[in-house]
Image (spheres, rainbow, N blue to C red):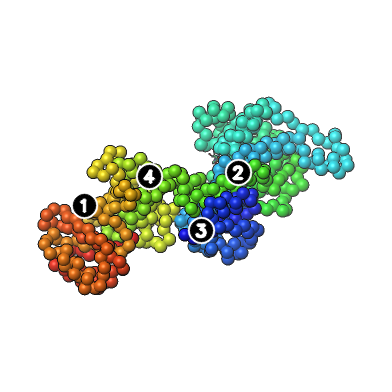
Amino acid sequence: MTKPKVLISDKMDPNAAKIFEERGCDVDVITGKTPEELKAMIGQYDGLAIRSSTKVTPEILAAAPNLKVIGRAGIGVDNVDIPAASAQGVVVMNTPFGNSITTAEHAIALMFAVARQIPEANARTQNGEWPKNDFMGVELTGKTLGLIGAGNIGSIVASRALGLRMKVVAYDPFLTPERAIEMGVEKADLGTLLEKADFITLHTPLTDETRNILSRERLEQCKKGVRIVNCARGGLIDEAGLKDLLDSGHIAGAALDVFAKEPAKEHPLFGTPNFICTPHLGASTTEAQVNVALQVAEQMADYLVNGGVTNALNMPSLSAEEAPKLRPYMALAEKLGSLVSQLAHGNLTEISIERSGAAAELNGKPIEGAVLAGFMRRYSDTVNMVNAPYLAKERGLQVRSVRYEGEGVFNTLLRVTVATSAGPRSVAGTLFADKAARLVEIFGIGVEADLEGHMLYVVNEDAPGFIGRVGSLMGEHGINIGTFHLGRRETGGEAIVLLSVDAPIPAEVITAAEKLQGVKLVKALNF
Ligand SMILES: NC(=O)c1ccc[n+]([C@@H]2O[C@H](COP(=O)([O-])OP(=O)(O)OC[C@H]3O[C@@H](n4cnc5c(N)ncnc54)[C@H](O)[C@@H]3O)[C@@H](O)[C@H]2O)c1
Ligand SMILES: O=C(O)[C@H](O)COP(=O)(O)O
């Protein structure tokens, strides 16, 4: 098996490259490339490991036909076009906890720095001025911190602020009253937070809802003398409004680690009194960088080598323990999805995926993804379990997932049913003790078969001599039969023949089979 190839395209702790190699991947570390240069080289890679500098645009993705996973050594993924990656079947993962403490500490550091004007005092002191009378700071003790976003980083900032004897008021639509009590913060709406806060820190991702969350109007609503810290994303604050309100003195200070446009080498805010900034250093500590580098490399290698999925933003997680258990089910699921789509006709608008017995105990999402991948393969060559649910949604396919805990005849069973104009059509399969996928039913007729390679499916009337006629036809055309499986609804009723052959079945053999006595339908199947 050829080794998966990974490109690390942003500065990352060297542990990442080491882990990739130890886990069976080839790795190149090539940083600082322009989008054009990245486009020219990305085609050869299975994995792309990034921080915030590399922008993964639809153009980059279009030049990456082999790409299977993008790993963000950090939290924010606003530099990755996730819908485009999903549509292309590329898993996008991040490391949601590796740099949270470090970033929270940076927010606290900036809060102190802006409260005591430390950067300017430092610069002027080192300039030989000794400006002791020019700086009068404020204490944090007893002040109210308004926290916008109370997730991982926000909650660490809250706990540190409480330790500094601040009061914390938090605005986060997803913060439950119970969690607010647990965190020791007061849950508030944004208006109340703006009225009460002496300091505000932001800890939300940049989304359509959070963009400009501190707009000029909202900045004007803030308590006079407020100090604002943003260690989350540029774009959350109206930068022009911030400058005007710093100039007017309504806002007493602001500290930004992030800007709407980065790198920010020139900016109207530069030089504004009581404005301090750092160049997106929130995650830049040795500890955090080792954490995120190790984590991203482990996650990506696990996916590329074993199929395990952790911290993916566009598909359900699949632990390294679950992956080996689920793998045979996913193979079965994909085959059943493919079989039902090759056999059922008409406008298929609904698909139902049932898991019973042991299968009901498993994580259903990857199985669902695999059924849909098999089902959608007829419509797209590039479909996989990541993009299949998106493609299915795009086509208006309704997907139902059902689990039955009890065992039937089989101790584990997957059944896939599609709604057709002639009524529901279902196929079912099980796993034998050797974990091999076996078909056990087609459209209500019991039949036991492997679904492998090239197959011929024939529906006929159950009558003596038919098996011989099919065998002779194959022999006449020089087609070697590998396996031969039979099933029937009842004696003399509708029957099926499913045989595997060693080579693709030519169209003239299908036509000849259709002319055999008693034949109702013939189809070549491929798996
Ligand atoms: N400066 C840096 O170097 C640096 C480092 C790490 C993370 N970050 C940024 O910090 C952000 C927060 O990280 P996290 O780990 O805490 O993420 P998180 O997902 O744990 O928390 C984000 C919180 O924002 C809340 N939220 C979402 N929409 C909101 C809205 N409209 N109003 C208020 N709250 C809203 C969510 O409910 C969630 O609780 C990341 O998205 C990333 O962009 C920056
Ligand atoms: O979202 C993040 O994790 C931070 O913005 C850190 O970004 P960086 O890895 O480029 O420092």
The residue located at (58%, 27%) in the rendering is 184
Labelled pair 3, 4 in contact (Cβ < 8 Å): no
Residue ID for mark 4:
364
Residue 291 is marked as 2
Q: Secondary structure at mark 1?
A: strand
Q: Earlier in the sequence, mark 2 or mark 1?
A: 2
Quadrant in which the C terminus appears: bottom left
Residue ID for mark 1:
446
The residue located at (70%, 27%) in the rendering is 141
Residue ID for mark 3:
3
Q: Amino acid at mark 1?
A: Gly
Q: CA distance from mark 2 to mark 4?
A: 31 Å
- The answer as to whether callout 1 falls within 8 Å of ligand 1 is no
Residue 277 is marked as none
Q: Amino acid at mark 4?
A: Gly
Q: Amino acid at mark 2?
A: Asn
Q: Secondary structure at mark 4?
A: helix
Q: CA distance from mark 3 to mark 4?
A: 29 Å
| x then y, percent, for residue 339 | 30, 57
Q: Residues within 10 Å of mark 2 (few under 14, many from 20)?
A: many
Q: Nearer the viewer, mark 3 or mark 2?
A: 3
Q: Earlier in the sequence, mark 1 or mark 4?
A: 4
